[in-house]
Image: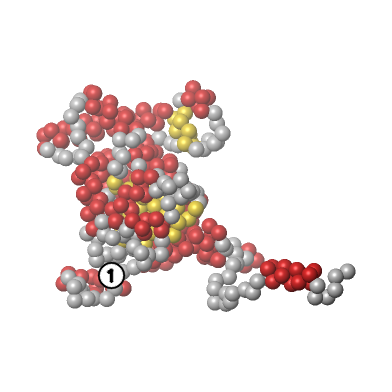
Amino acid sequence: AARAGGPYERAWEGAAAAVLVKSADLSGEPTVSGYDFNNGVDHDALLASMISTGFQATNLGRAMEEIDRMRKWRLSDEPVTEDTKEEWRDEAVRAKTKAKIFLGYTSNLISSGVRESLRYLVEHRHVDVLVTSAGGVEEDLIKALARTYLGEFQLRGAELRAKGLNRIGNLLVPNENYCKFEDWIVPILNAMHDEQERHGVVWTPSKMIHRFGKEIDDESSVCYWCYKNNVPMFCPALTDGSIGDMLYFHSYRRPGLVCDIVGDIRLMNDHAIHAAPRRTGMIVLGGGVAKHHINNANLMRNGADFSVCVSTAQEFDGSDSGARPDEAVSWGKIRAEATPVKVYADATIVFPLMVARTFARREEEEG
């Protein structure tokens, strides 16, 4: 046996020192705790507990706090300086001046039941500018004309094709829905073409969407509420979907209808630039054009002040869709002093919860 103080004793002491490294003092830091169902079922308290639960639940809690910050901000929170314009000096005006909130989302969320959460935000004027993809426009309009059905992720494509059924994840959209959409939109495109020729109307994607919202005249529709409340909906890729198909067919039946995307990029960027002295907030669900169009517009004002992104995309492939908010900070799309949050989660699960805990809850509290 080795003598006390021998090589084995020294090895043990070294191992113990390696395993039992002295801890830094964490007193004062938040501790981990989840919701205790012994207290009954309190959904508001359950959502409030997310921030201390850990992992993506904590990011969800932080995202809800960030939304509340952008929602509660008022110009009266900022000091009046010698550079403040006269129109912004009145305290009553400052107390009513809110942050401008940009909301972006991908088309699959309109296909899903998240459409109702998005519609609620526009209906109650909680957001100021929308950006989506072509499917985010047309699927909203189509759902006002016909139903989307629940299916299964594993349904075979060849079998669905033979039945005239289109799969979006575990959702099913009959081909008949698009036939109804064509019947609905063709006379509208003809009327818009007439107005272009007779009255010199210059159509942009957002003007087209505004018109579609008027024509659909259905309170279940996001586009309808954008029209009703004069909330602009931008779609720089409007032709990338069924609307594009309809425009393609129209171009052969009656050539000459023009859609001006330059007019919209000017209007979109002006919404960000001329928001001042208001702060701006971004809520983005998913990635692609919906995310970047909002981020890039806010670059024009040296970045958004508040930012929440919900996505399952990862950053390792260098995509903008997967990029963490700090990458946008490097481009000047989010301000350096901001506290942006990204939640790595399926928006169909977390976004309705975010709306419930923030916009809907506050509206209920404030009457």
Secondary structure state at the residue bearing disc 1: helix
Colour scheme of the rendered structure: secondary structure
State the image quarter where residue 255 is shown.
top left
Identify the residue shown where x is 30% and y is 33%.
244
State the image quarter where residue 86 is shown.
bottom left
Residue 36 visible? The answer is: yes
| Other-residue count near label 1 (Cα within 10 Å), few / some / many at <14 / 14–19 / ≥20 | many
In the rendered image, residue 329, in percent from the top left (x then y), is placed at 36, 59
Q: Which of 328 and 289 lies nearest the eye of the viewer?
A: 328
Q: Is residue 172 left or right of residue 212?
A: right
Residue 358 visible? The answer is: no
User: What's the amino acid at mark 1?
Assistant: Leu
State the image quarter where residue 198 is shown.
top left
Q: Is residue 109 left or right of residue 255?
A: right
Quadrant location, the C terminus: bottom left
In the rendered image, residue 299, in percent from the top left (x then y), is placed at 29, 56
**Residue placed farthest to the right in the image?**
1
Q: Which of 252 and 352 lies nearest the eye of the viewer?
A: 252
Q: Is residue 5 left or right of residue 340?
A: right
Identify the residue shown where x is 41% and y is 64%.
339
**So how many labels did they put on this image?**
1
Identify the residue shown where x is 27% and y is 64%.
278
| Placement of 4 over or under 199, stated as above or below | below
In the rendered image, residue 289, in percent from the top left (x then y), is placed at 35, 45
In the rendered image, residue 201, in percent from the top left (x then y), is placed at 15, 39
Identify the residue shown where x is 50% and y is 38%.
169
Quadrant location, the N terminus: bottom right
Q: Which residue is mark 1?
A: 75
